Amino acid sequence: MDPMRLPDGLAPWAVRAAESRGRLHAEPAGGTRSPYQRDRDRIIHSTAFRRLQYKTQVFVYHEGDHFRTRLTHSLEVAQIARSIARELALDEDLAEALALAHDLGHPPFGHAGEDALDAMMKPHGGFDHNAQSLKAVTLLEARYAGFDGLNLTWETLEGLAKHNGPLRRPPPYIAEYDRRQALDLSTHASAEAQVAAIADDIAYNNHDLDDGVRAGMFTLDEAAALPLVAEAFERARAENPGLPRDRATSETVRRVINAMVNDVVAETRRRIAALDPKSADDIRAADRPVVAFSEPMMEANNALRAFLFARMYRHWRVNRTTQKVKRALQMLFTLLHGEPRQLPPWWQARAGEPGSPAAAAAVCDYLAGMTDRYALEEHKRLTDPTVPG
């Protein structure tokens, strides 16, 4: 037997379903499914997850059918997270559930939408998509008879709240929820949550590299000036002489992903060996994450991120769209906050008086849940007299 695995096939420091801290609302066991498999299934069946199909990653939905959306991004993150978790003898189902849920709180129009809502919500604590993800699964999803939200396990909620590390100053909703069900915000999350977080970084940078070339924002040759990309590009060409340009991009990207995954596995094993943890709680109590890139890979990843920031996220075409959608969301917020009787009935009941903090929170949640398409249609309905309300 692999000395890193116990008889159940997991490492000693993996989260174990049999030792879960449970759910806020007690429920019967799930039969053949583990608690984390049930969490994953509830996430997949949620309204918030379906909406990710029409939420921006970088490109607004109407700009092309082949670019990533929040949904396809989440699926790619889940695939990478499962691969890493399997190699490290962690609970794959928990890692997958966290990967699938990590973007449920993203508003329409990607980071432009988040910036717009954060600006409008400044007097009320701002807007944070991680906190909104937790809010979606603990409050806003209304599917079950006995509770609001999805009633996910403690371990999944913990991973959503702090997959990027301990929260010394948690956003308002996370702090509020922590008073109902303590999530140990001052510690790191489980290794499974850390895997989901780094899988997000790997997927994000690599599929934006792919989409950026596809959109003509830069060429593969320009990206190949980066050491990590250059090595993968040269190997792809050497192993496949005469490879067409579109396939060269895909071959390069998959090699970069593979290099990053292998690096994470190797570096995590080094950190585990140094820490010598005996349990999942030892991972939480560590003074740094255990799942991480090596220093050279971190530098290479940062260089790729800086390249994408300059050449893609600040491309003039993206800038134009960013400004248009920010204005649209800000106008929607102003109109609905000032007169919440324009909201659908369920949201009106939450909003209360015009201009109140309750109205701001309700309008923010309403807007954050929208797809790109629905937000643009709602903007027309509220601003164009020729469009029926």
Image (cartoon, grey):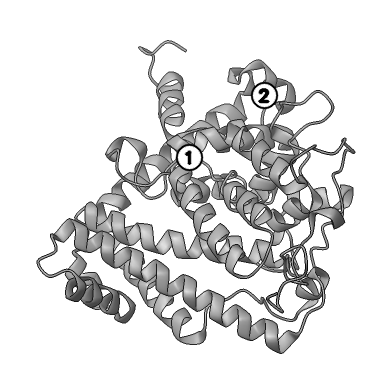
x, y percent for residue 357: 72, 38
Q: Work out which quarter of the rendered image holds the N terminus and state it.
A: bottom right
Q: Residue furthest front?
A: 1
Location of residue 310 with respect to 296 vertically, above or below: above
Q: Nearer the viewer, residue 371 or 249?
A: 249
Tell me which amino acid carries mark 1. Pro
Q: Residue furthest bottom?
A: 274
Would you say 271 lies left or right of 246 here? right
| Amino acid type, residue under disc 2 in the picture | Trp
Q: Residue at x 60, y 63 (%)?
A: 86
Q: Which residue is mark 2?
A: 347
At 70% across and 57% down in the image, what residue appears? Answer: 159
- Residue 12 image position (x, y, % from top left): 78, 72
> Which residue is found at the position 63% from the left and 23% from the top?
340
Residue where numbered disc 1 is placed: 108
| Labels 1, 2: front one | 1
Q: Quadrant of residue 223?
A: bottom left
What x and y, as percent, mark residue 85? 61, 64
- Report the residue that reaches farthest toward the left: 242
310 vs 101, left or right, is left
